[in-house]
Amino acid sequence: MPLQIVRDDITTMKVDAIVNAAKESLLGGGGVDGAIHTAAGPELLAECRTLGGCRTGEAKITQGYRLPCRYVIHTVGPVWRGGTHGERELLASAYRSSLELAQRYRLQTVAFPLISSGAYGYPKAQALKVAVDTIGEFLLHNDMMVYLVIFDRASFELGEKLFADISAYIDDRYVKAHGGSRIEQRRRALFAAGTACEQETENAAPCQAAPQARRDLEEALGKLDESFSQMLLRKIDQSGMTDAQCYKKANIDRKLFSKIRSDIHYKPSKPTAMAFAVALELSLAEARELLEKAGFAFSHASKFDIIVEYFIARGNYNIFEINEALFAFDQSLLGG
């Protein structure tokens, strides 16, 4: 199941468990910790008192009480001390311990805050990378739906250089739809041709375009080749990956992949088709071909397309890093 970055209030998430960025005492605090305790009610604190605290990088679990989730997983992230005191390893351990605990309890859906990025001072861009890398690695080998919950835009930071590079890439290629564009010119030409044909019909003069159009359509239908589903399965076989490896790398749910595999005429959404192009590490030309099978194309009129193109052109096929960038630019995320 996929990792999704969402903007929400973690205390309202209807999932099996939410993760609390707690203090070692587990007795409540400020920020996310305080909000979770307030929403859960005093019963949560009473149970936490029985746990004997929690060491940094580890995790413990309680009931959710008045929260809409069944459980709260409490984990302790590191305090930022310049990055030379094992902070990255401890932060990764906090995520990993929480995920392993969720797996032990057979939980299917878990929501994380951005651990240590508040009062503990961990730089947000680095905290985000640790979160995405650690959760992404876990999901390559396990089935679980994981949400990384960002409370507001101020809580999210993409690396400044990467943000600037992508912004420049978009500026160089972004085509605003206006009257002078080729798409608009073509649309006007087609409209004019249609109007002319209607006028001929009204004047009882036959329109010669219609029979030719029908012949062109019949010819095109006669040339139908492999569908998106067929091409995808062929590409997976050629890559040497298993189906599971591919849909996990694509951030796609197993059930959605089953639909694609079982239906030769399945029409995926554009983010799903793009996700498989990334998972298969296709070149731009190959990615365009796969998208065409789904009825789509790369467009420089779409920021979503340009951002994905930016990563493919640079040989970066980490779907979670691509989704970080898409989220930063308020675009749809890859996957299902």
Image: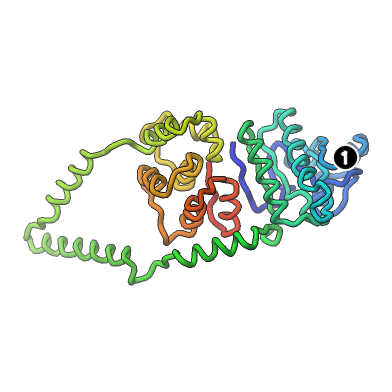
In the displayed structure image, the side of residue 279 where residue 14 appears, left or right = right
Number of numbered labels in the structure image: 1
Residue 170, image x, y percentages: 49, 63
Q: Can you give x and y, in whole percent of width and height, for residue 126 in the image?
A: 71, 53
Q: Which residue occupies 91% across, 39% down?
A: 53
Give neighbour class at mark 1: few <14, some 14-19, many 20+ (Cα, 10 Å).
some
Q: Does residue 179 lie above or below 273 as drawn? A: below
Q: Residue at x 39, y 45 (%)?
A: 286
Could you say which is closer to the camera, residue 247 or residue 61? 247
Identify the residue at image location x=69%, y=39%: 110
Indicate the position of residue 254 as horizontal and vertical percent values: 54, 32
For this orientation, the residue located farthest to the front is: 84
**Is 6 left, or right, of 91 in this rendering?**
left
Tell me the colour scheme of the image. rainbow
Above or below — where is 15 with respect to 154? above
Report the quarter where the N terminus lies: top right
Three-letter amino acid code of the residue under disc 1: Arg
Q: Residue furthest left?
A: 205
Residue 285 image position (x, y, % from top left): 38, 48
Q: Is any atom of residue 62 visible in this view?
A: no
Q: Which residue is mark 1?
A: 55
Mark 1, secondary structure of its residue: loop
* Residue 123 visible within the image: yes
Figure quadrant of residue 223: top left
Q: Residue at x 61, y 35 (%)?
A: 140
